[in-house]
Amino acid sequence: MDEDRVDEDDREPFPISAAASAPRPHRKTQSYSHQLNTSRTTDSPSSSWSSRRKINLRNHSVDSLDETSKNILDGSDDEEDEYERFASASNGGGGTELQSFFNEILEPQPEAVPEDQRKFLAEFVASGGGSGIFQVPVRAAMHPGRPPSLEVRPHPLRETQVGWFLRNIGCTETQLWAGQECGVRVWEFRDLYEVGCGIGGRMRRGDEDAVPFAESAPTSPTLCLIVDAGNRFIWTGHKDGKVRSWKMDRRGSEEEGPFKEGFGWHAHRGPVLSMAISLYGDIWSGSEGGVIKVWPWEAIEKSLSLTAEERHMAGLLVERSYVDLRSQVTFNGVCNISGSDVKYILSDNCRGKVWSAGHLSFALWDARTKELLKVFNIDGQIENRVDMTLLEASGEEEVKIKFASVSKKEKPQGFFQRSRNALMGAADAVRRVAAKGAFGDDYRRTEALVMAMDGMIWTGCANGLLVQWDGNGGRIQDFHYHSSAVQCFCAFGSRIWVGYASGTIQVLDLEGKLIGGWVGHSGPIIKMAVGGGYVFSLANHGGVRGWSLASPGPIDNILRSELASKELMYTKLENLKILAGTWNVGQGRASHDSLISWLGSVASGVGIVVVGLQEVEMGAGFLAVSAAKETVGLEGSAMGQWWLDTIGRTLDEGATFERVGSRQLAGLLISVWIRRTLKPHIGDVDAAAVPCGFGRAIGNKGAVGLRMRVYDRVICFVNCHFAAHLEAVNRRNADFDHVYRTMVFSRPSNLLNTAAAGVSSAVHMLRGTNAGAVHPDDAKPELSEADMVVFLGDFNYRLHGISYDEARDFVSQRCFDWLKERDQLRAEMVAGKVFQGMREGIIMFPPTYKFERHQAGLGGYDSGEKKRIPAWCDRILYRDNRSSSMSDCNLECPVVSSIAQYEACMDVTDSDHKPVRCVFNVEIARVDESIRRKEFGRIMDSNEKIRSIIQELCFVPETIVSTNNIILQNNDVSILRITNKCGNDKAMFETVCDGQSAINEEGQASDPFPRASFGLPPWLEVIPAVGMIKPGQVGEVSVRHEEFHTQLEFVDGVPQNSFCEDVRDKEVILVVTIRGGCSTEIRTHRVRVRQIFTSKRVDSKIRYSGKIPSNVLQRSDIQRLENTADVVEDLRRLNTP
């Protein structure tokens, strides 16, 4: 026994070294039973009796005593006192001391020592806990492996979010919006550093420490969300198939209540899975079965213009105006696009196209004409499902499908042609079903889609692969930086952020080079959005964090240092007691008195009760049924439920305690009860099971576990039953190693909540995948990441090198130190072979195995034919955050535990094992997120270095636009040149339309009305509308007039009427927005574009309605400039007096 491995907690350590060096006790020649029968004489009072504390309801007896002696022993109220006195009598070798021990039991007992004055037990610490997977997890006031974050919404407990899970987020210029299961909510950027309302405030559970927000009236679950900055609307798609609008300027307050939706319409029969606003301001939506609908802006605009009396017709007006794209590309019953759910819709504003995607295929559409351009799979291979005679090639090697005209009858096809199309469709369906079932394609499925500022399209796959595409659907190159599933993208300026199912965030440049990465959340990151100088990330558990646009960078070290210096301001210390009990019940049932003795007698002062049972039910038939149920996700048994109900009644479940989780694997059962007053601070309960018997498949041996968050710290409880028999030490060690490495906690009761958070199935498919050098923490077992782990159960370690009679004699003499020298578990822990780094209280109770049922006292040890050697099979061990025994509780060592009681209930006789219990006193350090967020804001506002870095983010490169006035007619094309005069930084530009005006006969323009998201009118083509200009270079934008005089009006997806577009001259204001690589500031150039119809004369003296700078170029001044030199020369002439 190594005394250096014994920790000290406010008391003198147990004298292990002295006991180990003491001479071996005299081996008595009489048997254990004979000694007890002959030792009943004199009386000898004990001087130490009055100094011992009183513990109720522990009744022990010894074998072979007459009925009177048994009754005396059964009245004992103090196990430790009894054993100490009994040991004193036995060591003397005579009956006088033993008789005095019996007499003192009948004397009045002193008052119990107050709880706060009790001494904690000394502990034994196993070797091997300082390295590898057994190393204590690193904790700090500021996470050392990631940039400091702004906690907009701290990780809420999952149990508080049922019906309220956040699904997605989006940013406007001043707000952060989130779609949730029952509507939407909005945060104002000006409130980002405000404190929360706290527990007991007006917010519901889970939002006590969140930034103050406004919330909508309840709706169907929100599945997708898009921002319409042009009309200041938020458009949301919902599970009930409706599209709803929300005004950015409308707020709910505590007095007014939740705000209400603007107007909406029923868009799909199924849920609205995806939405996007095209370059031309139309809203595209996707649903199940490959359905894609386009909602023309003209119908939405008309609905918005209705009076209050007519507003009830607004939804119906839009609802019947859709264009059904799937029906447009269906010929003879064969559709050219996939029938899988439309998970993603992306507007390519650079080229005026729209991408729609399922998990395994893509479709490329013309945003203006709604024509299908291309269908291709995840490998970039073109897929065609209709006869080629219906196809024609046009422009940029793209294939456009002719629309079926309602005015012309489709040419009848022959029998063979129709058969060919039907066979092609059937073959495609079979191929897609096979592809969905193929393991490889499941891992390659598309999980995210985004367009970068340089016009490239990026997709993320379930295996972590990042794929870069050009605007025509050509696959360019792949990148693989992480093995976990990609869940979301966010592109802003010259950077791309990637969110993974592992909770990792990575930052890439536009060329795909990895800039940095960190673990952003403890769960999958399902959405990201940019606004207010932050990249906001939403995890599937509902937590929202903001990361500086300058991260990773110097700002991180400054913030980390400043916040660490204020640690004491936002640190809170909590204290609670945990009662852990283990019992091998031997397929039996317990009496109420037994449960009171084991649990009820000590539960009054604890906050958490965890119970682990073994052999609840056994037998070959039961084990087979249990294994079959596990394969289909079922668990439990009638006997297991009886135990849960009975223990619940013992703990006064419902009034005092509440059961928060349980897990059964064959005969193993674990359950946790918490005191109701602690319910606001405990949640996220997950379960796990690891079978170890019969090829690691049957649960006769193995472990079950529960994991939970307690005051924002993770605590795991694991109930184990390892291999039996004296010689099976290595098997027991292997069982522990298997359990520790492979136990993976899941949320069987939270499958709907996972879907509610929008996380893909790839999260579950790829769970446990290692990321190697990219994210080495992924390789660690989940138990190693917990702040505290408690192992309890029947570990089945025995006493070796000792006979049955010797063991019984040592028990009778209270020579536990000699017995512990023979303890297999203690020897293996010293050698660092099992329970590495774990702690156990010093054992001061007799071996708990094996006893005859219903035979009280120490005389109940197995006296049958096998005479199994007594052993401490039933144990409770733990590990907290301490790397040394003297660590104080703080944010670097947030969970510090000590053992207040560790004992066996020897009076319980319902099984061949005695129940064991351990009471932990646990100190927990946690962060007050509201206070830290407020300090975060003060640092951001006051630190000069940070202010300087943020100022750099505001830098916008100087640019020149070649003209501010363009006149178009007869399909004219004008080239707008944008010159980046900055020699060091890239310029990002985006061209939007501020609104369209009609020109009257006098040449005056009416007030402009913007389309959705400042979209372009159908007669105008701007390519590229989005792009990047390198330092000192010139970017060219083509501004083209499109003949679009005739428009189709759709009713219920079918073209009904055609009408001529307004032939009046029109005028739009193009706004060219310029920003830097990661700039939060913008500069704008306004360009007036006027459309002149061919039948009208072009007047060289055009009158303008708005203010235009003095250097307006008339139509005759517009020149065809071929290169940069021409632009420079032209600008020189322009500025020369």
Image (cartoon, rainbow, N blue to C red):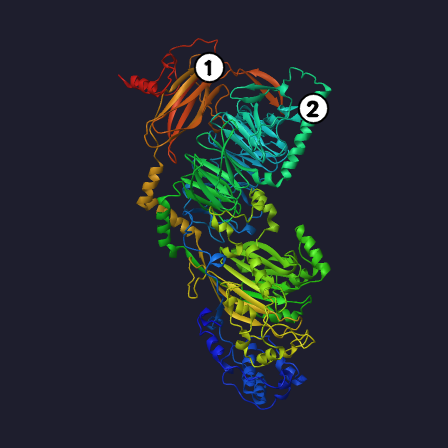
* Mark 1 and mark 2: Cα distance apart in space: 50 Å
Q: Which residue is mark 2?
A: 420
Q: Which residue is mark 1?
A: 1065
When the figure is inspected, residue 592 is found, relative to residue 279, above or below; the finding is below
Q: Disc 1 or 2, which lies upstream in sequence?
A: 2
Around disc 2, counting alpha carbons within 10 Å, would you say few (fewer than 14), some (14 to 19), or many (20 or more)?
some
Could you tell me residue 777's position as x and y percent?
48, 51
Q: Residue at the location (70% across, 17% down)?
A: 412
Q: Secondary structure at mark 1?
A: loop
Q: Is residue 336 left or right of residue 3?
A: right
Q: Nearer the viewer, residue 298 or 12?
A: 12
Could you tell me residue 913's position as x and y percent?
63, 70
Residue 309 visible, this angle: no
Q: Secondary structure at mark 2?
A: helix
Q: Is residue 818 left or right of residue 1126?
A: right
Callout 1 amino acid: Asp
Identify the residue at the far left of this view. 1137
Callout 2 amino acid: Arg
Could you tell me residue 569's position as x and y percent?
38, 55
Around disc 1, counting alpha carbons within 10 Å, would you say few (fewer than 14), some (14 to 19), or many (20 or more)?
some
Q: Nearer the viewer, residue 9 or 1108?
A: 9
